[in-house]
Image (cartoon, rainbow, N blue to C red):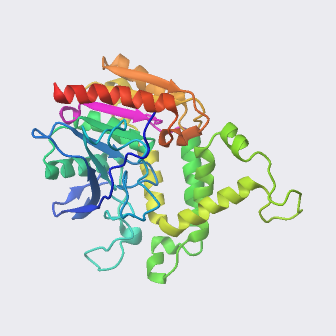
Amino acid sequence: MTDTNCSVGIVAAQDAVFDTPLPLASGAVLPGYQLRFETYGRLNRDASNAILICHALSGHHHVAGRYHADDKAAGWWDTMIGPGKPIDTDRFFVVGVNNLGGCHGSSGPSSLNPASGQPWGSAFPVVTVPDWVTAQARLADRLGIARWAAVIGGSLGGMQALHWSIAYPQRIAHALVIASAPKLSAQNIAFNDVARQAILTDPEFHGGDFYAHGVVPRRGLRLARMLGHITYLSDDGMGEKFGRMLRSGEYRFGYDVEFEIESYLRYQGDKFSDYFDANTYLLMTKALDYFDPAKDHGGDLAAALKQATASFLVASFTSDWRFAPERSRETVKALIAAGKRVSYAEIESAHGHDAFLMTDPPYVDLMRAYLDRVAKEVNA
């Protein structure tokens, strides 16, 4: 079991500013940009113990630790990262980065466009998983890291780990692809579009330039998050936690909150709309939609993975219907066909897609065992 009390302690974010233009997959060019990141642990003498953590749709660079002694919110993967935890900061130098287009310190729609001095808004270009990986590689160069001991990510983060193995095969020793997929299904693209439509049709969106109007498309963002959150949970998990519980114990025959699950979803939507940027939500869901490494290889994922040299851990969760185990098995099948070294685990969990953020003992044990192997290679 993980000792959740064993923390990396007080941490601070850092900013890396890049003046070199970044050509994007869309054909646009970002003239310069900033990446916000955090590091935990120490880089060893030959810089061979570095691990990159790639975040999912609503994630960011704050992966572990706290910003001050009274900080109630630890980093989003604090249960997994720290001294003695599976991603052991006594052995690894861990890097978390907020991707381009984010709203937590890296250049994105809510940051200032140097050409205008105003928020980028709708002018910020669409970014993709390959664009993120290119930017992450530049950050690795800045940090003196020629090769990652591992790149790890869940969901959209897993897509980044997979792309690292394809785009920079000599710069990654291990790719841990958790609760992810080699491309989105039509159903997933549909969920993303409904969420985007909720934002795009909010009267306060103003075509993405709502900053200039001093408003936030809160209703649209709230609905998008509520929809997304439903897909992150499992039916059994929701039933066990909420069932058909009524807040007042009886039907009120109206349209206000009656069921506990309604209250929970509205709370999640309200909280999310207070801190997340609507344009960033659009960008992140589009990056999910566009990811398809097999596209340039005639739909052959094995061919796309042929150049990878990393070893792989692919993990899925039985109750995850947003990124179902079948999708992970597609990746495993392609890796085997490409002749790659791959371990696969399908983990029993009632947490749905969110299981990759949880501490189910089999999952924690799997991560610990695999990363012990990575640490032994580093110290060999």
In the displayed orientation, state which residue is furthest to the bottom: 213
Residue 176 belongs to the span the image colors magenta: yes
Give the residue at x 45% y 77%.
211
| Quarter of the figure with residue 236 | top right
**Can the viewer see residue 168 in this picture?**
yes
Q: Position of residue 261 (x, y in %)?
A: 72, 53
- Left or right of residue 300, residue 29 in this image: left
Judging depth in this view, the residue of 341 and 64 nearest the camera is: 64
Q: Residue at x 41, y 69 (%)?
A: 122
Residue 316 visible to the viewer: no
In the image, 365 versus 342, the foreground residue is 365
Along the viewing direction, whichever of 375 and 167 lies nearer the viewer: 375
Which range is magenta?
Answer: 169-185
Measured as percent of width and height from the top left, residue 129 is found at: 35, 46
The answer to whether residue 319 is left or right of residue 123 is: right
User: Picture coordinates of residue 190 (x, y %)?
Assistant: 58, 47
